[in-house]
């Protein structure tokens, strides 16, 4: 019989599976983060959220993964507290790296487009309250999170693109921009009482401020 400590071991609660040639790992804290993001949902809406949000994040990461594979890389996907991460086994050129980075948000935009097209072609889908809620969530998550993820704040996709465009000589400028943008998002989030988003961007801003301090020290 498994002991309590064994049951509480994160390794025992980690979900692992493969999508074709792509290994996927889902950490236990990922589900807690999804619950926090969906804390304003109740009843069936919360259940739908716990299906739609993880699926949308997985689609986002698969956009990165499939594009990297097209460039010859071997990849793996990990879903964690901060969202998701796609690892590939080789460095890519700056242009290819930007293409891989952009593929994530645009995979989400494509998913949102398919949902919108389904509603356009089959308007009766909206007659079911639960289906209408699910499709509304899919549109919101894939459009809204995709746009947020394109903000120039590392390690978000937009921040990675900003660092790649800036190049090694202008990393400081990219980090300063990240701190300013993160601070603006924190203020905006607090004005809307979105504490989790404020906490997230506060942490991201602090991380980039630390990177600035380290570069100044050298």
Image (cartoon, rainbow, N blue to C red):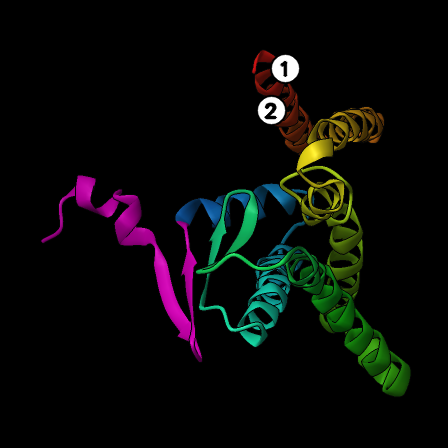
Q: Nearer the viewer, residue 37 or 101?
A: 101
Regarding mark 1 in the picture, which secondary structure is present there? Answer: helix
Q: Name the disc covering residue 31, or none.
A: none
Q: Quadrant of the C terminus?
A: top right
Name the residue beneath numbered marker 1: 216
Which span is picked out in magenta?
Answer: 1-27
**How would you rate the neighbour count of disc 1 (Cα within 10 Å): few for under 14, some for 14-19, many for 20 or more?**
few
Name the residue beneath numbered marker 2: 211
Say left or right for 193 vs 70.
Answer: right
Say left or right for 121 vs 107.
Answer: right
Q: Residue 6: image x %, image y %?
A: 18, 45
Q: Is residue 169 magenta?
A: no
Regarding mark 2 in the picture, which secondary structure is present there? Answer: helix
Residue beneath the point at 57% across and 58% down: 50
Rendered position, 15 above or below 182: below
Q: Which numbered disc flags the more N-terminal residue, 1 or 2?
A: 2
């Amino acid at each position: 019989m498994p002991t309590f400590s064994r049951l509480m071991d994160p390794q025992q609660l980690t979900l692992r599976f493969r999508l074709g040639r792509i290994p996927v790992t889902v950490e236990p804290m990922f589900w807690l983060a999804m619950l926090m993001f969906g804390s304003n949902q109740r009843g069936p809406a919360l259940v739908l959220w716990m299906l739609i949000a993880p699926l949308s994040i997985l689609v986002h990461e698969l956009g990165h993964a499939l594009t990297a594979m097209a460039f010859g890389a071997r990849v793996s996907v990990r879903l964690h507290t901060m969202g998701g991460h796609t690892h590939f086994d080789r460095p890519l050129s700056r242009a290819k790296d930007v293409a891989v980075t952009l593929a994530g948000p645009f995979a989400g935009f494509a998913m949102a487009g398919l949902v919108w097209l389904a509603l356009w072609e089959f308007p009766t889908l909206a007659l079911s309250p639960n289906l209408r809620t699910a499709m509304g969530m899919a549109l919101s998550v894939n459009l809204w999170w995709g746009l947020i993820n394109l903000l120039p704040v590392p390690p978000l996709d937009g921040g990675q693109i900003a660092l790649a465009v800036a190049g090694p000589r202008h990393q400081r400028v990219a980090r300063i921009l990240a701190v300013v943008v993160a601070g603006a998002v924190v203020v905006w989030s607090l004005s809307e009482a979105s504490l989790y988003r404020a906490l997230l961007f506060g942490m991201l801003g602090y991380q980039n401020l630390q990177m600035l301090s380290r570069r100044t020290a050298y």
